[in-house]
Amino acid sequence: MKAGHILSSRIGPPLWLLAELTYRCPLQCPYCSNPLEFAQIKNELSTDEWLQVLRQGRELGAAQLGFSGGEPLLRQDLEELAGEARGLGYYSNLITSGMGLNYDRVSALKTA
């Protein structure tokens, strides 16, 4: 489906894109909105597939992007995805527990 088709409908363009990069998470928070069985799903989008999703989102008019999961820090390509989001002009945020976050990772994400 082409992005222009959606824009021509009566519904306005999306303003916000929530990218649930993975359902994997090292925690088992009882209040989490993602059921534990979601962590069993092994079919995550590849880096290239996510890059295409980000591009399509901007083409549709999305201006804000939230990286979420599960725990998005478990994705080894998070910095690459964040860099692409920046290049596309998204206002981005990272929805994370912070597990696994260290100075080097923060620095890499900041410069992405």
Image (cartoon, helix red, strand yellow):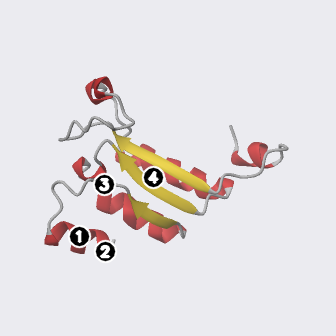
Q: Amino acid at mark 3?
A: Thr
Looking at the figure, which quarter contains the N terminus? top right
Q: Secondary structure at mark 2?
A: helix
Q: CA distance from mark 3 to mark 1?
A: 12 Å
Res 110 label:
2
Q: Amino acid at mark 2?
A: Lys
Q: Position of residue 27 (x, y in %)?
A: 19, 41
Quick check: marks 3 and 2 in contact, CB under 8 Å?
Answer: no
Residue occupied by mark 4 = 51
Q: Amino acid at mark 4?
A: Leu
> Going from the N terminus, do you reach mark 3 or mark 1 first?
3
Res 106 label:
1
Residue at left offset 39%, top offset 67%: 83
Residue occupied by mark 3 = 96
Snapshot quadrant of residue 40? top left
Q: Amino acid at mark 1?
A: Val
Quick check: marks 1 and 2 in contact, CB under 8 Å?
Answer: yes
